[in-house]
């Protein structure tokens, strides 16, 4: 099969959806399928890359940050990916599309389906389901009907957890028959890496600093621990100033440290030095 993967974030950009795009592309490739990825360019990276039956096109969307995308960047991605798709679909004889996020990415898949009759599947990631993080999806007030139209054209909408699938069905009752759940896959290491033995417990978190990650409650819970510990946070996001203020107010600046956004390779190294990975 010849498969087109659409995601405006691909390593080193973005978080879980970005990594999942790479993992799926590699698994499709291992099974003998040809994969084309259209994503966003970031300063210092290549605009074009090809390896192991995988071709990557990175579009000049004026991306400024590794961890977040601005509205103008997403708009440019939709415009440029739609234009590039017209060339790729014919050149690579694309048979199927997999689009990450209902909005904005699936706008491209939807247009490709109308123009070239290429079927598409949508991967629901959380931030594209209105009630998952309501304060971050206010744009659905304006684009709900269009999102519904995109969902109706899709073959399926696949949520990455059962809870997210239930939320999506509540938000889009007209699409209930098309929404299902396939959990995120993970990369299984062939060899278990050596892990540091620490004298005091080391906790860590990696990801976007947003309300949905529940970091404020995590920090408050750790505050109750009497034994010595360190909590290392790797990431960035709109919640960072509020978290820094909370850490200062609780007098935890020596125990809770926020580090800049790190690459997957750097995160793996830090995980080997930690005792617990915290996710809520």
Image (cartoon, rainbow, N blue to C red):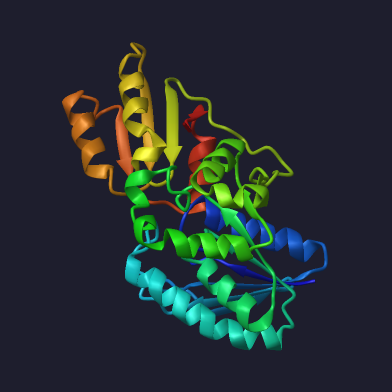
Q: Find the residue positioned furthest to the front.
A: 174
Q: Is 180 displayed left or right of 42 in the figure?
A: right
Q: Position of residue 43 (x, y in %)?
A: 39, 73
Q: Residue at x 82, y 67 (%)?
A: 32
Q: Residue at x 73, y 70 (%)?
A: 52
Q: Is residue 220 above or below residue 211?
A: above
Q: Is 168 displayed left or right of 28 in the figure?
A: left
Q: Is residue 92 above or below residue 180?
A: below
Q: Is residue 7 above or below residue 178?
A: below
Residue 13 can be seen in this image: no
Q: Position of residue 138 (x, y in %)?
A: 33, 53
| Quadrant assignment, res 240 | top left
Q: Find the residue positioned furthest to the right.
A: 32
Q: Residue at x 55, y 65 (%)?
A: 150
Q: Position of residue 278 (x, y in %)?
A: 47, 31
Q: Is 98 displayed left or right of 210 in the figure?
A: right
Q: Is 77 displayed left or right of 141 in the figure?
A: right
Residue 177 vs residue 126, the one in the foreground: 177
């Amino acid at each position: 099969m010849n498969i087109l993967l659409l995601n405006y974030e691909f390593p080193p950009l973005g978080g879980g959806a970005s990594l999942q795009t790479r993992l799926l592309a590699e698994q499709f490739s291992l099974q003998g399928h040809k994969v084309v990825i259209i994503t966003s360019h970031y300063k210092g990276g290549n605009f074009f890359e090809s390896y192991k039956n995988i071709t990557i096109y990175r579009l000049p969307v004026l991306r400024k940050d590794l961890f977040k995308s601005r509205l103008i960047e997403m708009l440019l991605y939709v415009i440029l990916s739609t234009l590039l798709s017209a060339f790729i679909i014919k050149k690579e004889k694309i048979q199927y599309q997999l689009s990450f996020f209902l909005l904005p990415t699936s706008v491209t898949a939807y247009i490709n389906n109308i123009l070239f009759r290429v079927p598409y599947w949508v991967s629901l990631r959380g931030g594209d389901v209105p009630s998952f993080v309501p304060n971050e999806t206010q744009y659905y007030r304006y684009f709900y009907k269009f999102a519904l139209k995109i969902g109706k054209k899709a073959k399926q909408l696949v949520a990455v957890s059962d809870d997210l699938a239930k939320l999506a069905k509540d938000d889009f009752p007209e699409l209930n028959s098309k929404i299902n759940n396939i959990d995120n896959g993970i990369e299984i290491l062939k060899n278990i890496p050596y892990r540091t033995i620490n004298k005091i417990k080391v906790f860590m978190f990696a990801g976007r600093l947003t309300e949905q990650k529940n970091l404020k409650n995590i920090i408050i819970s750790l505050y109750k621990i009497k034994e010595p510990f360190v909590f290392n946070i790797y990431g960035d996001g709109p919640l960072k100033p509020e978290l820094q203020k909370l850490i200062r107010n609780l007098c935890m600046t020596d125990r809770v440290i926020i580090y800049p956004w790190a690459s997957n390779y750097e995160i793996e190294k830090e995980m080997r030095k930690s005792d617990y990975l915290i996710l809520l």
